[in-house]
Amino acid sequence: MLIQDELLDVLVVGSGIGGLTSAALLQQQGFRTLVLEKNRFAGGSCSSFSRSGYTFDAGASVFYGFAEDGQSGTLNLHTKIFRKLGVKVQTVPDPVQIHYHLPEGLNLAACYDRGLFLDRLTAAFPHEREGIGKFYAELENVYDILSSLPAGSLEDIRHLLTVGSSFPMKTAALAIKTFQSMGKRARRHISDAALLHFIDIEAYSWALQDAVSTPLVNAGICLADRHHGGINYPLGGSGAIARGLVEGFERCGGEIRYGAEVSEILVENGSATGVRLADGSVIRARVVVSNATIWDTFNRLVDDERYRIPMDRFIEAPSWFQLYLGVNGALIPEGLNVHHVLVDDWSRYTDSGGTLYCSIPSLLDSSLAPPGRHTVHAFVTDRADDWAELERGSGEYLKRKDMFTRELIQRLESVMPGISGGCELTLSASPHTHKRYLNRHKGSYGPLLRPGQNILVKPQNTTPVKNLFATGDSTFPGQGVIAVTYSGISCASFIAARFGKPMEPLD
């Protein structure tokens, strides 16, 4: 047990995947590290919870980074981290990343087999055969570059010099590609409007932005690595990832304190010196790492107007309305894929509720539901501002939740006929729920880049406050579990080098 009165090396605010990754790697590197978590569980939106025999993913359900190295270059960050920590997280491969159900009858499964995926796409758009080949070859090229380079901090000059000297051509090519847009590159090769809409939803399904607003570098990971490392689901649910990181962290001597809400990051003479908890107690450390959003960190936890983040610097991503359903297994059609995205109207797919996401992870892991039953997780974007006038738990609040629930279940009928009458357990979560449990500004998915902004404009791990660092989806490279994992590695690597205990690249 760490003693509060002693000066710690590192305090990590929040146990999201970025924070846990940083904490585990720093603790193993010899830094005395303490993680402070408001909730009674770790993982943030990458956690699981159970009700009436069903286990649900709180948020994330599509996972990269778990393949063996021989299958996927060096992007298998979860594989490498858990190997370094001596922890085993068992997974099961999913042959389909997402099954898309789109307007004008386009029904397409983005599968692990790259050749099969391209064949299906070409069959749907035969007149775009050449353009399809060229565009997806560009994504493959980005993946090839990224999979050759070791993960590390872009702010660590030594790391950049090492990578640049070891891989000069690939480093130069990647530097150029950071200025390129996925959508603009697609439009160089493709003109069919329906196909460009498909490429937009490919981007939107994980970036919450259309393809033009999505950096080509990010697309090279998410739309190319699915054909190399693939999609792998952790047995026991998404919370298995957080539990694995906590296990590795604690094995190395680290401590995570639950029910410890940070109310303030203490700054003295321009340098972070520790935190104040909601109960008034103070914990001091040489370094503070914030896993909170950029807005929560500098507009709430750091009490200094000089560091405030203007709300118009980035696009504020929406929150979510989520459904967690326990259903009779007879309602799940034979051969149904696990992950689905449904769009009814291209004119409103980016609006709140315009795109419906759905996953049935118990198809991969039967332990998530009672015998003969399945877990269904369905969700749409939503905004906290639309719920601002509704008091949580009030009649009007519950009425709106009920209305949203019935609407989403009805939309699921196209994938699972009869589900409207077959739900044995129904739970829902509004943006208020996200804000309350995840302690995030408006329950938001984090800051998004504006169209035309280079990906390197994303905040990095260092901040304007000395010895205050950041990790999570507010930092480079952005949203998604594999992205925040990278940010955690980058943060730990930079801190370790800064304080004289440089880390070796993950292998």
Image (cartoon, rainbow, N blue to C red):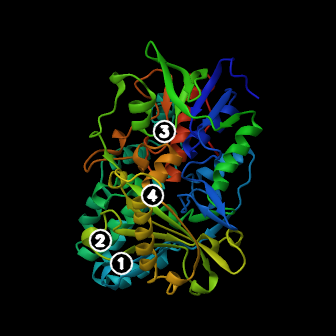
**Residue for badge 1:** 102
Q: Is residue 389 above or below residue 35?
A: below
Q: Toward the viewer: 187 or 369?
A: 369
Crowding near the residue tagged with mark 1, few <14, some 14–19, many ≥20 C-alpha atoms within 10 Å? many
Q: Quadrant of the N terminus?
A: top right
Q: Nearer the viewer, mark 3 or mark 1?
A: 3
Residue denoted by label 2? 197
In percent of the image, x 46 and y 30: which residue is there?
301
Tell me whether the residue at label 3 lies in contact with that at label 1, contact meaning CB atoms closer than 8 angstroms: no
Which residue is rendered at x = 63% and y = 68% of the image? Answer: 93
Q: Do residues under tags 1 and 2 come within 8 Å of each other at their CB atoms?
A: yes
Structural distance between the alpha carbons of marks 1 and 2: 9 Å
In front: mark 2 or mark 3? 3
Query: Residue flagged by tag 3: what amino acid is it?
Result: Ala
From the image, tell me which residue sits under label 3: 292
Q: Which quadrant holds residue 431? A: bottom left
Could you tell me if the residues under marks 1 and 4 are in contact, i.e. CB atoms within 8 Å?
Answer: no
Q: Earlier in the sequence, mark 2 or mark 3?
A: 2
Q: CA distance from mark 2 to mark 3?
A: 33 Å
Under circle 4, the secondary element is loop
Q: Earlier in the sequence, mark 1 or mark 2?
A: 1
Disc 2: CA contacts within 10 A as few (<14), some (14-19) or many (>=20) = some
Q: CA distance from mark 3 to mark 1?
A: 35 Å
For disc 4, the marked residue is 430
Q: CA distance from mark 1 to mark 4?
A: 25 Å
Q: Please tell me whether mark 2 sits on a helix, a strand or a loop.
A: helix
